[in-house]
Amino acid sequence: MNTYATHSVCKTLIALFTALNMFTNYVSFFTGGNDRGSAGDINGTTIVITLFVSDVEYGWSVKNNEDIERIDNVNEYLSIAGDYLEEQVSNYGGEAEFITDFITHEDLAYYVRVDRNMENVEFERDYDANDEVMWSNIDECIDVDYLKEKYQADNAVFLAVFNTDVNNPAITCTRNWYPGMESDNEIVFLYYIDYGMVNPPAVYAHEILHTFSAPDLYTTNPEFGITQGTIIGIQNKYPNDIMLTCSDLGTGDYVYDRITNEITEITASYIGLI
Ligand SMILES: [Zn+2]
């Protein structure tokens, strides 16, 4: 998640509507597909499987009180994100259930040790190698079909969490499904601290939304029909969309006990709610 500072930009209403119409047409075309990886339709039940990843740079220790506190925070932020997604989906007449609590459900969290630097992601090939090492760990350690059956879940989302500090150069991101991807498993790479800040519940929800096909709204993306003009329109009409910003609109700060951003109709249309 790149945090985004909104600034006011003037744009005529006609230009805005033109941009948004184009966008909506593109969306209905895009969401026509069937298989969208391990996370498909946000309606239904989703399990979030959390992987606490120790790499060559940053590790987790259950003997360290600070780490235990962080693990508790991850569970809490996920719970806030899950409740938020359920409520936002219900605002559009949908019904979603998110099962995230790995303290109550201990088979929803795993410790994983990898022999590479997962924060050294300057080049595209490093992202690919990060995916591959996580996919092979998931295949080896986790019976995803069994868990989906057990929790009567339609979707599974993986959250890989890294115990980073303020020197971490990597940015939280999500590998969302695309046709031909070698694994169906969509992984959120959640760096506990990036940009020098602890990521708040809004970032967890934002990243989970990526796995349901929501694109970032702060940067151009030709694949999703998001041009510079579209972004200006979104900034004007939907300044609090969670795919545009994860900071509180009023203060510009992260909030840790709730989520104050919204799934506006633009993100709702991308994930098939409208
Ligand atoms: Zn994002």
Image (spheres, rainbow, N blue to C red):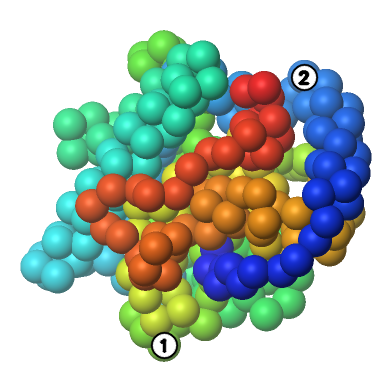
Left or right, 245 with respect to 111, comes to right
SS for callout 2: loop
Where in the figure is residue 164, as x and y percent of width and height? 37, 74
Q: Say whether residue 11 is visible.
A: yes
Residue 219 picture location, percent across and down: 73, 63
Q: Is residue 263 above or below residue 152?
A: below
On the image, numbered disc 1 is attached to which residue? 167
Nearest the camera: 58 or 263? 263
The x, y position of residue 145, in whole percent, is: 50, 20
* Lower position in the chain sequence, tag 1 or tag 2: 2
Quadrant for the N terminus, please: bottom right
Q: Is residue 230 visible?
A: no
Amino acid at dot 2: Asn
Q: Residue at 53% x, 68% y: name it.
A: 3
Mark 2 lies within 8 Å of ligand 1 (Cβ measured):
no
Q: Which residue is mark 2?
A: 34
| Three-letter amino acid code at the position of disc 1 | Asn
Count the numbered circles shown: 2
Residue at the extreme bottom:
167
Mark 1: C-beta under 8 Å from nearest atom of ligand 1: no
